[in-house]
Amino acid sequence: MIRMILRHAKTADAEAICSTVNHHAELGLMLHRSMESIYDTLREFQVAVDDDDKIVGCVAVDIFWSDLAEVKSLAVAADRIGEGIGGRLLTAAIDDAKQMGVKRLFSLTYEQRFFERQGFEVIDRHALPEKVWRECLACLKADACDEIAMMLVLDE
Ligand SMILES: CC(C)(COP(=O)(O)OP(=O)(O)OC[C@H]1O[C@@H](n2cnc3c(N)ncnc32)[C@H](O)[C@@H]1OP(=O)(O)O)[C@@H](O)C(=O)NCCC(=O)NCCS
């Protein structure tokens, strides 16, 4: 197993989170995050930190309602993909959601197989509440979104 720790984000991590997410956002794989939005939601983030104290991945859990949350901004440093870091971050996000009492955790993603490995299932995107789509207004693909909606039920 690779050596790294997972922990909740600190303010000093914001720039690394921003550049990790936006690297993949530039490739059209996820939504851009501004520094401001990262500071606003910093308490939602967990980060993966390697032996050299470098941030090599991040994930956030955004609470929508009493029983619903989204896994957001899940990103691994481009030079560390395929080492199991993303899998561990997703597990940590699921645990975080469970601890907060979330019953259903969803994701909008292109990484169907990756999410299926941890029990997420494809759902009809229209089953998600309208509030979910608010952020999409800022996305270039807003009218032609091809992300897959996936859900994990946590209370079974
Ligand atoms: C999606 C993403 C988070 C996955 O992170 P990751 O660290 O690459 O994920 P993992 O390594 O845990 O698993 C990915 C693959 O690597 C394989 N893998 C895991 N550990 C491995 C290891 N030590 N050596 C080689 N391969 C390994 C897994 O089996 C998996 O293979 P598969 O998907 O082909 O079955 C990452 O690719 C990423 O940041 N992508 C861009 C942003 C993005 O799309 N985010 C999701 C938005 S919701």
Image (spheres, rainbow, N blue to C red):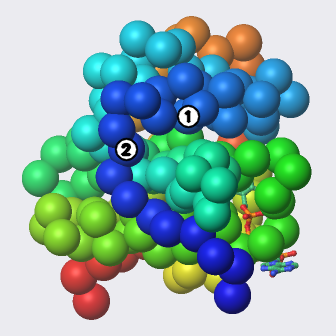
**Is residue 116 rendered to the left or right of residue 124?**
right
Give the percent coordinates (x, y) of residue 82: 83, 68
Quadrant of res 87: bottom right
**Is residue 8 rendered to the left or right of residue 145?**
left
**In this view, 135 is above or below 151:** above
Give the percent coordinates (x, y) of residue 104: 31, 65
Pick the quarter of the image with the C terminus.
bottom left
Q: Quarter of the picture for ligand 1?
A: bottom right
Quadrant of res 21: top right
**In this view, 93 is above or below 142:** below
Q: Residue at 55%, 41% (x, y): give it.
A: 73
Q: Secondary structure at mark 1?
A: helix
Q: Secondary structure at mark 2?
A: loop
Q: Residue at 38%, 59% (x, y): give it.
A: 7
Q: Of the residues shown, which amino acid type is indicated by label 1? A: Ile
Give the percent coordinates (x, y) of residue 33: 55, 21
Tell me the residue that label 1 is attached to. 17
N-term mark: 2 or 1: 2
**Is residue 100 rendered to the left or right of residue 75?**
left
**In this view, 139 is above or below 86:** above
Would you say the residues marked 2 and 1 are in contact, meaning their CB atoms lie under 8 Å apart?
yes
